[in-house]
Amino acid sequence: MNTPPQELAEERLAATLTAGWGLAVESLAYRAVGFGSHHWELVDGDGTRWFVTVDDLRTKRYAPGEPLGRAYERLRAALATAVALHAHGLGFVVAPTPTVDGAPLSRVDDRFAAALYGFVDGTSFSWGDFEAGGHRQFVLDMVVDLHGAPPAASAFAAVDDLHVPGRADLEAALEGDVPDGGPYARRMRDLLDARPDHVRDLLARYDALAAEADPARAVLTHGEPHPANTMRTPHGWRLIDWDTVLLAVPERDLWHLEPGDGSVLAAYEARTGVKPEPRLIELFRLRWEVADLAAAASRFREPHAGDADDDATWEILAALADTPP
């Protein structure tokens, strides 16, 4: 996210890091990287650098009014799975450092949860296309290893039910239920009112394809193995941001890698014996769009100030709402 949450004082975050991980916090510096979570770089009393991720549990809810504790437990399950994967030998998994009590994260308060990571030095990448030099192949290698992880590594993992968080907000917005809580509320209401069938067709297409997913094909999936969630380090490639890990059909990861010529799908089948289904590749492409629309609806149905993150969310919403399904 581009801006730190105004409702979270850094002093409160520092106290959580001390209580949860026993760190003497010398400095905390906000880092505007990624979109969805908040990030800080931390330096402790020994001069060691750490990376802190904070999630607003309101954005992790499946529906308005869902208890934040349920969102927290889903996040806890995902990060516990990352810890288990790393412990089972998948060294490319950048897993959180457990608290002194062995938990993968800690509640800051009712609304926010924090996770701590060792600082990873390396080359980061932006959202978009994979770079030349085998970038896509290296990520496919990690995905194949992940999908073949031992069953014990999935003990904490939740199952992907193909639910889209915030969908109820999107459907409410399509009916014009958008309270005037900020500068983008009316703009979103007008945008969706001008093309309701467009968005409803997208949802209907998604539901039809979701009905074709066979849960018997489920493997451990990262969920978002796109370039921005990869790093090249002196010790090899890494996958970061494991808050989305779920047991799901393999296409949940593969759609991020397939360039459109079938080459990645063929390579995956040759290495695993599992034939990817093109219709499920389409399913997860659609899910990405539906999820972005739903996240925007959730954000703009709540009070908002029109900050840089609101601006970025509006650009995503406007682009998707203008794109035919």
Image (cartoon, helix red, strand yellow):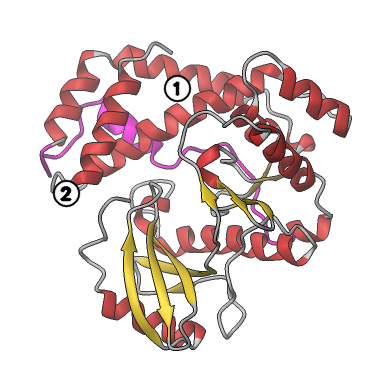
Residue 175 in the image: state x and y as whole percent.
25, 26
Q: How many marks?
A: 2
Q: In the image, what residue type sits under mark 1?
A: Leu
Q: Is mark 2 on a helix, strand or loop?
A: loop
Stretch of the chain drawn in magenta: 155-183
Q: Residues within 10 Å of mark 2 (few under 14, many from 20)?
A: some
Q: In the image, what residue type sits under mark 2?
A: Pro
Q: Is residue 253 above or below residue 50?
A: above
Residue located at (39% from left, 55% from top): 37
Q: Residue 203 carries which label?
A: 1
Q: What element carries label 1?
A: helix
Q: Which of marks 2 and 1 is nearer the N terminus?
A: 1
Residue 127 in sight: yes
Residue 97 in the image: state x and y as whole percent.
58, 73
Task: Pick the residue in front: 214 or 288.
Answer: 288
Give the left or right position of residue 301, taking residue 36 as reference: left
Q: Which mark is residue 303?
A: 2
Residue located at (67% from left, 60% from top): 81
Residue located at (24% from left, 33% from top): 314
Q: Label 2 vs label 1: CA separation? A: 25 Å
Query: Image quadrant for the C terminus?
Result: top left
Q: How crowded is mark 1: few (under 14 residues within 10 Å), some or many (20 or more)?
A: some
Q: Does the magenta stretch include residue 121?
A: no
**Image quadrant where residue 218 sits:** top right
Q: Which mark is residue 151?
A: none
Residue 219 in sight: no
Give the left or right position of residue 145, taking residue 30 as reference: right
Residue 27 in the image: state x and y as whole percent.
34, 78
